[in-house]
């Protein structure tokens, strides 16, 4: 797999620490082969962010493919019905649906990292299961990046697809419901959180799944790494399963989000946490992130500061931590793959598991109230709380606690902690850039995620040129043509349209 996909904006950080995902084989694209597109900026009026600091300018940039000559609609030749790949079959043989792929099959399961021909050939080879992973951008204490769930899914979806053997991964849905936007509630009270309305989230899932079905995927699976994603995924899966009437199976796999099973497994393997520190963090998720990108958990900085522990578990030993991380990813992949096979055999989402016995056991272990040692009533919320936890439970959950780590060298909000975003806003970085790309056919040489790759290079460069800007995660799926019946780029395999 292309390592750049797992190091979003790595060039902008200037990190030199060795990665922990050396197990992945590199893709076939070098940095010098990335296509360069132009960008367009639109200035919008100022808005207020939930931390109280004005985000003064919002910039939207979209990657545009600029043609060498203008061709009017009257001059455009009639499109050959065998055309695919973003061009006309009559103009170039590589735009024809049945032209053999001039390149070998890539070592990747990510649709965004494949050409349209790669996707076409994978489908023909029986890879007809598509996994749609959903993550989030939210506060996770002082050590973990706001894109925690997205980093976890980069490792896990890859492993799950390979465990299944007949699956590909759609781009991660990075934005999910995180609380009311205005006025803010839930995680939206912490800087750096990005939230969707529930109906927006479900509409997004619907269009992505429908796009994949139109290309010939027969099993479409939702997995969500955050609790708030589960209900929307289940609702969309049930609606689409009824709508498709057997033409494709759509299933929400709740078992992916079974953190209790992986926690028990790792305890059996010798990884037992101590007292909960009251932060939106734990050893399992830290190690799962570490597997994909050590920077996402601030590994080097924490080791240097003597802060490389969570809930009594040390991650300082890199070799030991990597081995534990591999075990976590392997367990979750096998556990989820088994559940996916069951859902496919069931022709849809399995009944929701009965967790009453599990919660009762947790309550007894916690002295009467699950998740709160000592039992008793839940304390009233502290208005100073930020970071995904209660200020009264841990000082690192308080709005005015100084950042324990040095200033971060990235402009991507997804790679920053909530404290990093808070401090960047206070330092005057009040311009946010929202970049929109796409997943579409781009001939035989360029991957379907062309525009997203361009923006991963260009947004940091633009932000650094401005000096007062941060980049939101790239919006990776956009309108690409009618979904059903397909038109525009949707006539080519691998395209995802909204």
Image (cartoon, rainbow, N blue to C red):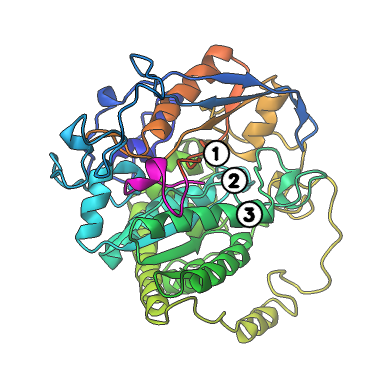
Name the disc covering residue 385, or none.
Answer: none
Residue 485 lies in magenta, yes or no? yes
Which badge, 1 or 3, is on the more N-terminal residue?
Answer: 3
Marks 3 and 2, Cα distance to the nearest angstrom?
13 Å
Q: Answer yes or no: do the residues labelled 2 and 1 have beta carbons within 8 Å? A: yes
Judged from the image, the secondary structure of the residue bearing numbered disc 3 is loop
Question: From which residue to which does the magenta span run?
Answer: 482-498
Residue 130 x, y percent position in the rendering: 37, 60
The residue under label 3 is 280
Left or right: where does residue 169 sit relative to residue 40? Answer: left
In the image, which is nearer the foreground, mark 1 or mark 3? 1
Image position, residue 373 (x, y; %): 71, 70
Number of callouts? 3
Position of 496 with respect to 116 (left or right) is right
Q: Is residue 239 above or below residue 286?
A: below
Is 83 left or right of 67, judged from the image as shown?
A: left
Q: Residue at x 69, y 32 (%)?
A: 422
What numbered label is drawn on residue 414?
A: 1
Cα separation, mark 1 vs mark 3, equals 16 Å
Q: Nearer the viewer, mark 3 or mark 2?
A: 2
Residue 137: image tag: 2
**Where residue 45 sits: x, y (%)?**
75, 23
Q: Nearer the viewer, residue 162 or 309?
A: 162
- Could one spot residue 494 in this view of the protein? yes
**Percent x, y for residue 387?**
69, 46
- Magenta: main secondary structure equals loop
């Amino acid at each position: 797999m292309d390592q750049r996909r797992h190091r979003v904006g790595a060039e902008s950080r200037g990190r030199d620490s060795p990665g922990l995902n050396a197990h992945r084989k590199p893709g076939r694209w070098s940095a010098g082969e990335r296509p360069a597109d132009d960008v367009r900026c639109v200035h919008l009026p100022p808005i207020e962010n939930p931390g109280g600091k004005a985000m003064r300018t919002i910039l939207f940039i979209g990657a545009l493919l600029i043609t060498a000559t203008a061709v009017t609609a009257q001059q455009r030749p009639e499109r050959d019905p065998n055309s695919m790949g973003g061009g006309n079959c009559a103009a170039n043989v590589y735009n024809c649906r049945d032209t053999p792929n001039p390149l070998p099959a890539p070592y990747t399961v990510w649709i965004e990292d494949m050409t349209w021909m790669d996707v076409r050939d994978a489908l023909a080879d029986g890879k007809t299961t598509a996994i749609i992973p959903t993550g989030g951008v939210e506060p996770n204490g002082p050590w973990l990046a706001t894109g925690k769930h997205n980093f976890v899914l980069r490792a896990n979806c890859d492993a799950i697809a390979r465990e299944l053997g007949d699956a590909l991964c759609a781009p991660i849905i990075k934005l999910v419901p995180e609380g009311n936007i205005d006025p803010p509630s839930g995680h939206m009270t912490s800087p750096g959180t990005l939230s969707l309305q529930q109906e927006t989230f479900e509409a997004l899932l619907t269009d992505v799944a429908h796009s994949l079905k139109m290309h010939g995927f027969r099993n479409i699976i939702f997995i969500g790494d955050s609790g708030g994603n589960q209900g929307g995924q289940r609702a969309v899966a049930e609606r689409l399963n009824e709508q498709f009437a057997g033409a494709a199976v759509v299933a929400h796999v709740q078992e992916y989000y079974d953190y209790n099973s992986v926690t028990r497994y790792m305890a059996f393997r010798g990884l037992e946490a101590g007292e909960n520190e009251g932060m939106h963090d734990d050893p399992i998720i830290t190690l799962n992130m570490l597997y994909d990108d050590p920077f996402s958990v601030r590994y080097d900085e924490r080791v240097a500061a003597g802060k490389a522990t969570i809930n009594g578990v040390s991650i300082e030993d890199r070799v030991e931590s990597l081995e534990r991380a591999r075990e976590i990813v392997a367990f979750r992949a096998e556990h989820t793959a088994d559940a996916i096979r069951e859902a496919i055999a069931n022709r849809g989402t399995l009944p929701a598991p009965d967790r009453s016995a599990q919660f009762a056991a947790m309550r007894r272990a916690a002295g009467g109230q699950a998740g709160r040692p000592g039992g008793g009533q839940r304390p009233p919320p502290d208005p100073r709380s930020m970071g995904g936890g209660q200020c009264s439970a841990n000082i690192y959950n308080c709005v005015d606690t100084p950042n324990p780590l040095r200033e971060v060298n990235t402009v991507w909000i997804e790679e920053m902690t909530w404290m990093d975003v808070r401090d960047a806003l206070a330092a005057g970085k009040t311009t946010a850039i929202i970049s929109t790309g796409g997943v579409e056919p781009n001939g035989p040489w360029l991957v379907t995620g062309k525009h997203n790759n361009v923006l991963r290079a260009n947004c940091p460069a633009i932000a650094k040129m401005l000096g007062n800007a941060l980049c939101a995660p790239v919006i990776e799926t956009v309108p690409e043509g009618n979904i059903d019946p397909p038109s525009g780029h949707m006539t080519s395999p691998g395209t995802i349209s909204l």
